Amino acid sequence: MRTRIKICGITRPEDALSAIEFGADALGFVFWKPSSRSIEPAQAVEIVAALPPLASIVGLFVDATAADVERVLKQVPLDLLQFHGDEPPELCSAFARRYIKALPMGGGVDPLAYARRYADATAFLLDSHALGGSGGTGQAFDWRQAPKALGRPMIVAGGLNAGNVRQAIEQCKPYAVDVSSGVEAAKGIKDPARMAEFINEVNRVGRD
């Protein structure tokens, strides 16, 4: 099965269009103000309006309140929610939307025990942050520690780039990979050549 690709931290319409043109399956918008890749709902609406059909739109939140999430949902046609903090399970499932829950792979947390709290998650995203962190550091975790029995599709994130994504896929065998800083020219500004190289490398895995 082909490994799916999510490009996260999209801030500009031209970057979103390039990512889809090169073959990305999903785009991630960050609605967490401390992030250098954070955007306002109005910006996200502008980007989505420029996209062709069938592009999957994911909204990323970190310890947001229900009101914060609802405010975004009223404006932006999100297909999936991604919760990247330590949100309680009842908040994650409160919006009649499928959601992805990030699992902290740093700091000694048992990812399987943590995942069991979120029984209705659509997928789990493995990132290098510790519990209480937010990810987005550009650092990879030890892929050998990826749990094998999550019971949901696995998405691998954290420090991925065109030079190491093959190894991550071969070790973890994920449903999808998620990249942000590894395809950027600057924080929040995607590099078309790096996006194309990353997507091409993912698509080559399993064909070689």
Image: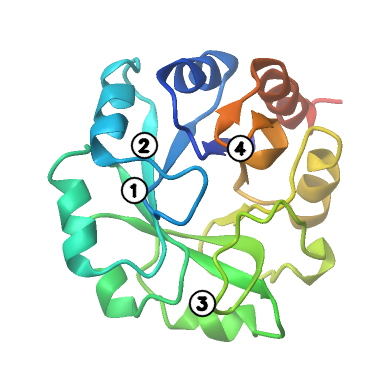
Q: Depth-wise, is mark 1 or mark 4 nearer the camera?
A: 4
Residue located beneath label 4 in the image? 187
Report x, y in % for residue 39: 37, 40
Q: Is residue 65 shown above or below 125?
A: below
SS for dot 3 = helix
Q: In 3D space, how far apart are the residues under numbered discs 2 and 3 (Cα atoms)?
A: 23 Å
Which label is found at residue 52? none
Q: Nearer the viewer, mark 2 or mark 3?
A: 2
Q: Earlier in the sequence, mark 2 or mark 3?
A: 2
Q: Is residue 23 above or below residue 36?
A: above
Whether the residues at callouts 2 and 1 have beta carbons within 8 Å, the answer is yes
| Residue in the foreground of this view, choosing between 137 and 149 | 137
Q: Position of residue 120 (x, y in %)?
A: 35, 70
Where is residue 116 shown, x and y percent of the image? 48, 82
Q: Position of residue 29 (x, y in %)?
A: 41, 41
Q: CA distance from mark 2 to mark 4?
A: 20 Å
Quadrant into which the N terminus falls: top right
How dense is the environment of label 2, judged by Cα within 10 Å: few (below 14), some, or many (20 and up)? Answer: many
The three-letter code of the residue at mark 4 reads Lys
Q: Is residue 41 left or right of residue 118?
A: left
* Disc 4 crowd, CA 10 A, few/some/many (<14, 14-19, 20+): some
Q: Which residue is mark 1?
A: 80
Figure quadrant of residue 5 = top right
User: Dot 1: within a 10 Å radius of its alpha carbon, few (fewer than 14), some, or many (20 or more) residues?
Assistant: some
**Of helix, strand and loop, which one carries label 1?**
strand
Disc marking residue 115: 3
Of the numbered discs 2 and 4, the one sitting upstream in the chain is: 2
Please name the amino acid that badge 3 sits on: Ala
Q: Which residue is mark 2?
A: 57
